[in-house]
Amino acid sequence: MDQFNTAAEKAKNFSKTPTNDEFLEFYGLFKQATVGDINVAEPGALDLKAKAKWNAWNKHKGMSKDAAKAAYIATYEKYAPKYA
């Protein structure tokens, strides 16, 4: 298993829940690393959770999957001491 998949699995099993902003950081990078540029329509303004997730992913638009994987691993390493 590569470093990205290992970090993603470990992040899913954090003993404590990251803050919403930290979760969105992981989410946006994960989607960019696995799917690439955002490919879904922007949700309506009233769907706050979906909108936040969409924005978190959209801010990485144009980043290569490999760069997103590296950024995800760095983000995991930044938060692991706090939540692992």
Image: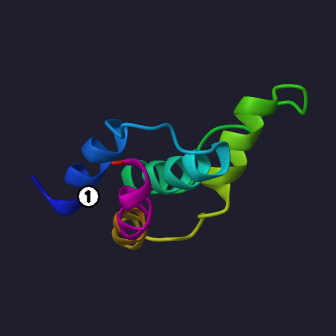
Residue 77: percent from left, percent from top: 35, 66
Residue 3: percent from left, percent from top: 19, 61
Q: Is residue 82 magenta?
A: yes
Asked whether 83 or 24 is in front, the reply is: 83
Q: Is residue 59 magenta?
A: no
- Give the side of residue 75 with respect to residue 39, left or right: left
Q: Residue furthest left?
A: 1
Residue 2: percent from left, percent from top: 14, 59
Q: Quadrant of residue 75?
A: bottom left
Of the residues shown, which amino acid type is indicated by label 1?
Answer: Phe
Instruction: Check disc 1 and report the residue beneath it.
Output: 4
In the rendered picture of this protein, how many numbered marks are placed on residues?
1
Up the image or down, 21 lies above or below 63; here it is above
Q: Residue furthest top?
A: 47
Q: Residue furthest right?
A: 45
Asked whether 14 or 58 is in front, the reply is: 14
Up the image or down, 63 lies above or below 1; here it is below
Q: Residues within 10 Å of mark 1 (few under 14, many from 20)?
A: many
Q: Residue at x 54, y 56 (%)?
A: 37
Q: Quadrant of residue 54?
A: top right
Q: Residue at x 51, y 71 (%)?
A: 63
User: In this picture, which residue range is highlighted in magenta?
Assistant: 74-83
- Give the side of residue 84 with respect to residue 60, left or right: left
Question: Tag 1, which secondary structure?
Answer: helix
Q: How is the image coloured?
A: rainbow
Residue 80: percent from left, percent from top: 36, 57
- Give the side of residue 12 with respect to residue 20, left or right: left
Q: Quadrant of residue 81?
A: bottom left
Query: What main secondary structure does the magenta stretch of the protein show?
Result: helix
Asked whether 20 or 41 is in front, the reply is: 20
Asked whether 55 or 17 is in front, the reply is: 17
